[in-house]
Image (tube, helix red, strand yellow):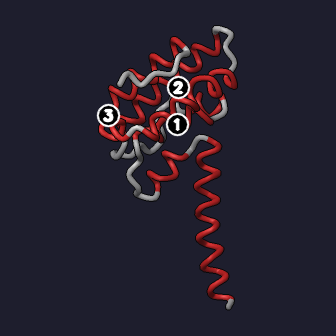
Amino acid sequence: MKKRDRAGNRGTSGVAMECAAFLDGTLAEYWDQRGTVVPVWAWTNLLAHGSEDLIGESVLPPLRPRRTGRSWRIARSFLAYEVLAVLEGGVTLDHLQSGVLIPLELEMAVHTEVAYWSPRQWLDTVDYAIRTQQVTLGL
């Protein structure tokens, strides 16, 4: 009985850790560290759910950059800088996230064609949404 409980707890713990990563904006890193392919929409997760400090940290390159996902990290770093620039203009992070970035993240997750986007297509779409504060996938 104890073995089964431990195995069940590990599964639940993994799900809980994944949910926590989603909610704090670190889902792409969570999956990448586990060798899971990161879907395109998940690169938006940091911008849509991360704190201002976490978004600011992503502007700088990581201490030990990984080869996988490098183009996505570079694109997200540019977008993190754009988010911070919009915040300096008086828009609150909560407003930008709840009104633009979370809806955009969800739209990307349900459109199967987004899975084939390049980092550039993703960057252009998210950049447009940040600058105009309008959600559109341009499909």
Location of the N terminus (image quadrant): bottom right
Q: Secondary structure at mark 1?
A: helix
Q: Secondary structure at mark 2?
A: helix
Residue positioned 48% across, 39% down in the render: 62
Residue positioned 62% across, 27% down in the render: 97
Towards the viewer: 66 or 85: 85
Please tell me which of labels 3 and 2 falls first in the chain: 2
Distance of mark 3 from mark 1, alpha carbons? 16 Å
Q: Is residue 35 left or right of residue 82?
A: left
In terms of image quadrants, where is residue 14? Answer: bottom right
> Residue 123's x, y, as percent?
40, 25
Residue positioned 63% across, 23% down in the render: 99
Q: Nearer the viewer, mark 1 or mark 2?
A: 1
Towards the viewer: 134 or 45: 134
From the image, tell me which residue sits under label 2: 80
Q: Secondary structure at mark 3?
A: loop
Image: 8 above or below 41: below
Residue positioned 49% across, 45% down in the render: 28
Please tell me which of labels 3 and 1 falls first in the chain: 1
**Amino acid tagged 3:** Trp
Marker disc for residue 117 = 3
Q: Is residue 135 left or right of residue 68?
A: right
Distance of mark 1 from mark 2, alpha carbons? 18 Å
In terms of image quadrants, where is residue 85? Answer: top right
Marker disc for residue 106 = 1
> Crowding near pointer 3: few (<14 within 10 Å), some, many (20+)?
some
Please tell me which of labels 1 and 2 falls first in the chain: 2
